[in-house]
């Protein structure tokens, strides 16, 4: 399901009530929701970050060409989104984006975009298979087959229910870290 990459889905009319430059108002502002599998990319990135057992920041960014279809990027400002699409159409170029590589067993390599979400959207719209990126770090996540070798599960209990649902869909068993049950996991009674 995730090997197909990210899809940009258009939704009904844009709401003018959205706050300008607010990433949380993305769908209202742009009329676009970016999804991977069944989940919005920003929520998927949060779920994979929650699974991180190691977060490596690079001293000097590595410049690469990355697959645009595996960039977890949600355009969130309508004007910036339109500008990026126009720039790609008129110049044929997009500046490098800033990304973190996410490595998880049984999934393709994904990239969490730190800067340049709108450029990623423009690349996908132009059907560019690759775009330039500066890789500034790497997240290594727990293996679904060995969830006990993962992060501090007491923190997972503080995640929003939809993030826990994504983790469970990824076959990561949610285990309470202490005798107290954690709401939203499979230890509830």
Image (spheres, rainbow, N blue to C red):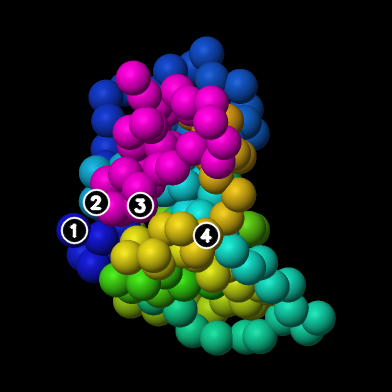
N-term-proximal mark, 2 vs 4: 2
Inspect this view and state whether residue 145 appears: yes
Q: Which residue position holds label 2? A: 37
Q: Nearer the viewer, mark 1 or mark 3?
A: 3
Q: Nearer the viewer, mark 2 or mark 4?
A: 4
Do residues under tags 2 and 4 come within 8 Å of each other at their CB atoms? Answer: no
Q: What segment is highlighted magenta in the picture? A: 161-189
Tell me if 133 is positioned left or right of 89 in this view: right
Q: Residue most toward the right?
A: 59
N-term-proximal mark, 3 vs 4: 4
Q: CA distance from mark 3 to mark 4?
A: 10 Å
Q: CA distance from mark 1 to mark 4?
A: 23 Å
Inspect this view and state whether residue 25 appears: no
Do residues under tags 3 and 4 come within 8 Å of each other at their CB atoms? Answer: yes
Q: Which residue position holds label 1? A: 1
Q: Which residue position holds label 3? A: 172
**Quadrant where the C terminus is found in the figure:** top left
Tell me the element at label 1. loop
N-term-proximal mark, 3 vs 2: 2
């Amino acid at each position: 399901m995730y090997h197909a990459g990210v899809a940009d889905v258009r939704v009904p009319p844009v709401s003018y009530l959205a706050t300008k430059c607010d990433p949380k108002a993305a769908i209202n502002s742009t009329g676009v929701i970016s999804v991977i599998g069944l989940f919005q990319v920003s929520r998927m990135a949060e779920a994979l970050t929650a699974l991180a057992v190691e977060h490596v920041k690079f001293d000097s960014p590595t410049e690469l060409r990355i697959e645009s279809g595996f960039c977890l990027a949600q355009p969130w400002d309508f004007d910036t989104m339109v500008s990026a699409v126009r720039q790609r159409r008129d110049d044929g170029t997009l500046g490098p984006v800033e990304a973190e590589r996410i490595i998880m067993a049984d999934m393709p390599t994904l990239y969490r975009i730190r800067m340049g979400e709108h450029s990623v959207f423009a690349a996908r719209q132009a059907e560019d298979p690759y775009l330039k990126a500066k890789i500034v770090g790497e997240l290594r996540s727990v293996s679904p087959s060995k969830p006990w070798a993962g992060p501090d599960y007491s923190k997972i209990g503080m995640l929003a229910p939809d993030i826990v649902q994504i983790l469970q869909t990824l076959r990561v068993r949610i285990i309470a870290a202490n005798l107290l049950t954690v709401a939203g996991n499979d230890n509830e009674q």
